[in-house]
Image (cartoon, coloured by chain):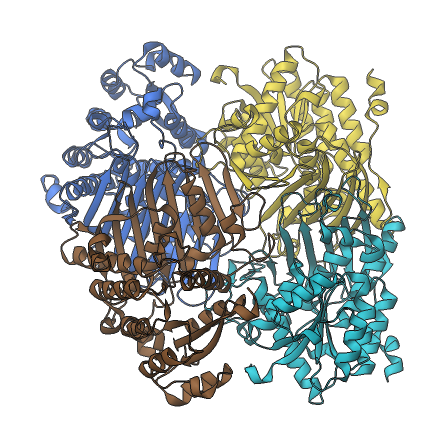
Chain colours: A cyan, B yellow, C blue, D brown
Amino acid sequence: MTEQNRISLGMVGGGPGAGIGAAHRYGANMDGAFELTAGCFSRDPDKNTEMGRTLGLDPERIYTDWQRMAAVEGKRDDGVRAVSIVTPNDSHVPISLAFIDQGVHIICDKPLATSFGDAVQAHVAARSGGVIFGLTHIYACYAMVREARERVAAGELGELLMIQLEYATGGRAKLIEAQGDAGAQWRLTPEIAGPSSVLGDIGTHAHQLARFVTGLELAEVSADIHTVVRGRVADDNAHVNLRFQNGARGQLWASYAASGLGNGLQLRIFGDKGGLAWAQERPDELWIRPVDGSQKLLRRGEVGLSEAARRSSRMKIGHPQGILEAFANYYNSAAAAIAAVDAGAPVDGTSFEFATSRDGVLGMKFVEAAVESSAGNGRWVDATVDFASLESPLR
Amino acid sequence: MTEQNRISLGMVGGGPGAGIGAAHRYGANMDGAFELTAGCFSRDPDKNTEMGRTLGLDPERIYTDWQRMAAVEGKRDDGVRAVSIVTPNDSHVPISLAFIDQGVHIICDKPLATSFGDAVQAHVAARSGGVIFGLTHIYACYAMVREARERVAAGELGELLMIQLEYATGGRAKLIEAQGDAGAQWRLTPEIAGPSSVLGDIGTHAHQLARFVTGLELAEVSADIHTVVRGRVADDNAHVNLRFQNGARGQLWASYAASGLGNGLQLRIFGDKGGLAWAQERPDELWIRPVDGSQKLLRRGEVGLSEAARRSSRMKIGHPQGILEAFANYYNSAAAAIAAVDAGAPVDGTSFEFATSRDGVLGMKFVEAAVESSAGNGRWVDATVDFASLESPLR
Amino acid sequence: MTEQNRISLGMVGGGPGAGIGAAHRYGANMDGAFELTAGCFSRDPDKNTEMGRTLGLDPERIYTDWQRMAAVEGKRDDGVRAVSIVTPNDSHVPISLAFIDQGVHIICDKPLATSFGDAVQAHVAARSGGVIFGLTHIYACYAMVREARERVAAGELGELLMIQLEYATGGRAKLIEAQGDAGAQWRLTPEIAGPSSVLGDIGTHAHQLARFVTGLELAEVSADIHTVVRGRVADDNAHVNLRFQNGARGQLWASYAASGLGNGLQLRIFGDKGGLAWAQERPDELWIRPVDGSQKLLRRGEVGLSEAARRSSRMKIGHPQGILEAFANYYNSAAAAIAAVDAGAPVDGTSFEFATSRDGVLGMKFVEAAVESSAGNGRWVDATVDFASLESPLR
Amino acid sequence: MTEQNRISLGMVGGGPGAGIGAAHRYGANMDGAFELTAGCFSRDPDKNTEMGRTLGLDPERIYTDWQRMAAVEGKRDDGVRAVSIVTPNDSHVPISLAFIDQGVHIICDKPLATSFGDAVQAHVAARSGGVIFGLTHIYACYAMVREARERVAAGELGELLMIQLEYATGGRAKLIEAQGDAGAQWRLTPEIAGPSSVLGDIGTHAHQLARFVTGLELAEVSADIHTVVRGRVADDNAHVNLRFQNGARGQLWASYAASGLGNGLQLRIFGDKGGLAWAQERPDELWIRPVDGSQKLLRRGEVGLSEAARRSSRMKIGHPQGILEAFANYYNSAAAAIAAVDAGAPVDGTSFEFATSRDGVLGMKFVEAAVESSAGNGRWVDATVDFASLESPLR
């Protein structure tokens, strides 16, 4: 990636103190794939200006509202070719529609929307608008997750039988939304967060990770979603049983209230020839466990890994990579796709190595199905999506 | 425990090559709590005799059938005071009833029975017969599990909110019952194993472990039980959502088909003050994770542990104890209870440190409720037991 | 091992509260290889009697001094065939000589002696007396240590280049000998413990472990031995550089003062084809690390391990074995050797799977060489032993 | 750090394919502390031009030799204020002297020099020239290493007694310098690498890490340095015993030939109140082990860590940071120091949070003392440096 080819990027959200905005900027910048040139960072004008100046932006490209940003950037010759949307959930779809309308590629934080219907709307708009709609499920961009996917695809685990997923975090095990934590406040407000706070925010990450690595899609779910922290309005814990379309079974646990844990996203897959395990807090490691014999610990950077792992790796074995490098992997993949689409390639994401609005549509279907099951005494609810019919207006 | 006070013990089952019988003998013998004096080890007369001789038994106390053993030992002045029953599941109740009838204390392998009704019958018979009915859920006898229980009881985790359980094993991930593995054959035959092979055999261990450590009882369950290994008759994987009577939620995964895993029993408990984690394959370790602050790794033998942990420990810190020592802890606790009951104490097991038929009744209720839920499209099924009414004939 | 064939065993030392005596008894008894029939447990007559009674011994075989015990047992038709010596270091040789004199096999705690000369005397006496002289370096009896030895011998690591050893413990990081800890008192008294407390007590374990697994012998050592805990008389920390006879280099760290550690014995071996690592606190695991490619975690009980590992294993994969099982493995191996020698086999220990006085002679040479180097400004000191010349009187 | 304040940076070395150059650029750029504006990346003119263009440099600031670069940049009004030197060891001093001469601050890869004398020359020149001379021992810039230092300084471990260091890597366990690996070729050529390849390259990292965390300085060393890989010219393994000026003892193992390991830098410190352990491959974790009681696992991002750890952290708990973030921490600290010095602060590095030429002087003294000891039959060699006398011309 040379300096000359950097893609001009805008950002909506990500004002002072917003960790997720900073993470996106680190990722966009790390390998020089993008150059941040415009932004609308905060509804607070002072914070917005401060952020834009800190980032060295041209003052006239620091916008006080995203509607105007979309309109103006869409008309500039040197306007942004892509926009990162790092705002609360309920604004993802309206903001992205405004930019899609201007032909700007989208890189949007997850979850895509606060309802399945909205997710579909955004997805269809991006497809018909001919733009990439990236959704930043960045955990699937770790090198060893990509390695896992290659090995599953190559049959190393045999036929897949069971998938165990968990995303258990401890940071919201206390009622921190009552103590002024802004991130917790909106994530735990149903109108902003969507039908399930915990499944929308972190459950969808686990859902996408499993689908990415296995290539399997859900058939139906049976769920128990509830609020465990006293005084909390939104849900904060979900137990979901899973049935996949190939007959594999699974279990997902998503929690905000796992006291003492950090950012505990874990994936375990079991097939008739072996199992694998990956945990986000030790991202450079991947365990492969044949049905008979010794367990193998694969490390990023070792001899014999896939091309997918190698191109996701910047440093030699034993030199740890972290989550910012996963963000950079996401942005690099998105940049490659944007360059391809701008050169005439189709926007169909199936060949891409990063999540898109297609994953977002499936994610929102998963969330809504789980909520329906939980309200329905645990009964199994269909979680499939008929993309052919959804996308038919496009064809 | 002196040699002179050793309790005379019989054994039913545990012939040549039966690992579980050997484990029971190691445990009974390790600290000299029991002395094996009689047995009926195998339906094969030659194997039976061979085993009895190897163990140095008086030939006339090597019995070819357990009915005769119960009758004869019951009449001997020096007859067995307790019997270990290490046979397949479906024979636990009839064998135990025969010995209860003779006033012999029972130490029975789990699960207690193949139905809730049979379990109740055995439980009530033991109570009315005035004998101890021990059920060898030995995992709860590890020193650090006992430490965990003390800490939960002392409020170190605060109010309990979530309980995550798994017992995932890889040893039956292939169709080994078709390859002559005797243990797999009966465990995977529903008529012998009971309504759920995987939940009866290993799910009940996890269920008892959670109850032992937390003191909580189940309210209801929602389950998905199925067979993942092709060609298998019985079930081999179960995903169960849990609701406890205090409102805590949980999840249990029991599997015979977790390719590449060993004997993966794990317990994680989360409260509003912190969480804990224990894994059977590293039994000397217990993690305590306060809701804020550093994680603590407690090790068996360290300064400051509970009396319960200390009396379950034979060796200093860093000198590993294993599962045979857990068996010995079980047998030692049972010996103490037997001595107390023989000296006039009541047989009510609530003050005991080891599992009894009461746990077996609850375990079979759990299994039957899960099976009913799984057959009922995942609906929540009551898993409570009204012991007052069950035991009313005794009062 | 049948009851009928149990070898009659005596014990010297191991009175009430002595953990090491208890560990030996557990090991001798676990698989029924030995039967304890006589003992001299304590110089305190009351404690001695108490211990013998607790163990159910015939009162006339509870001896108040070991000299009389050796003499009397030597004359009894049913006298002990072997004796376990679990006393402080300085008495190992005189006690063993008394029993060797009676043709009794020896199982002696380490280190063999408090000087190289004494060690040689005991070794030569046992050889000329035609008895087994076992030395309980029990760490080499863990199943996965035996597996490691098989793999090194089969060339899996290639040519051996480096050996890293450590035995770091935290239990004596405070001046506990001034607080009444009896075990610490004698271990930290040079007259009783020998020329180096820390190397004699635990350094020799690491030394034997490395030799057992690699088959290599030391050439020379360069050492720095010192006392780190204030107020202590004896040494408590040793840093030793190692040169092996094949040219491999190594490092050994032995410490009583590694605050916060438990019983940290670790072995790492590196060859030109790969490395291996084993740590005593996780004894069922063995890491194999090829020079290129993935790391392999071998677990006791898995498919494909050596016969040596299998015969050291009682339980299936994932069912932890601990140090008492290692003691039992030691005693079982010793029993097999005793039976063989009693049936006419030679006493030469090179084909045995357990440590003997030969290891003790080499161990004391190692200790004395390290002490000489440390006193000599770190200069390299020869650590080889010419057994041919030592044993020449026997030939 | 705003865009406007970025420090203009040059780079010498770091051409196409040089991982270390890329790592420095990631670190310099990550938080916007520096802007790369000039460079001399390769002696190969085509590669040099290619690299400069890829990085978007003004063509006239892509220099074909560093002498000219120093001269020209020194005269430009907008010339570089600092230069990163990422060339082989033997060129560090001449290059840095040229830039010091122009008043340019130095950020130099380690080791500082190929001899103690050269190291002193560079150190004195920087001091007298009034410029910062940073030496990129970046491992001390991980957040949890900084946390460790704070805790040691606060007395959490008590008086320090022992320090165990290792830096064992497997990447050069085969004769890869004969297979065209350019990095291995110069690192294993004594004329380029210095008196000890393995100690200069990685031993000095461990040496600086220990000094940084403990605040202790070495008194003397006893070493065994050798070549274990057949056919190799330079040394590749070193075993060093350490004595610190406060009386603490230690051990250091540095190896290129630890087959199967990655980048195994580890630090363990033991005091009379407790120990700590940190391992580079899990950089977000720090173990604190009190002499009595439970072990504590501290995680980057948790509540209660020091300000030093917090300012080294970009992401929340459980979101891994890697080595590129450590590089960025280094560059950020260096930028702060450069800004301070340019504003008139003294260049004395004792208050800085990053390594400087002072560490480089001590590092080269350590290397030379170890080499002398190894050649001198392991005798203890003084490793102290009298900075007062070295720096006297400056005073």
Q: Residue at x 59, y 19 (%)?
A: B336
Q: Is residue A329 above or below residue B124?
A: below
Residue D40: image location, x then y, percent: 39, 81
Quarter of the image containing the N terminus of chain C?
Answer: top left
Q: Residue at x 42, y 18 (%)?
A: C55
Q: Residue at x 53, y 22 (%)?
A: B33
Q: Quadrant of residue C126?
A: top left
Q: Quadrant of residue A292?
A: bottom right
Number of numbered discs overlaid on the protein picture = 0
Is any part of residue A370 visible from this angle?
Answer: yes
Residue D371: image location, x then y, percent: 20, 59
Quarter of the image containing the C terminus of chain C?
Answer: top left
Q: Nearer the viewer, residue D27 or C356?
A: D27
Q: Nearer the viewer, residue D64 or C2?
A: D64
Compared across the picture, whether A320 is left or right of B213 comes to left
Q: Residue at x 44, y 53 (%)?
A: D279
Compared across the picture, whether D180 is left or right of B364 comes to left
Compared across the picture, whether C360 is left or right of D141 comes to left
Q: Nearer the viewer, residue A340 or C57?
A: A340
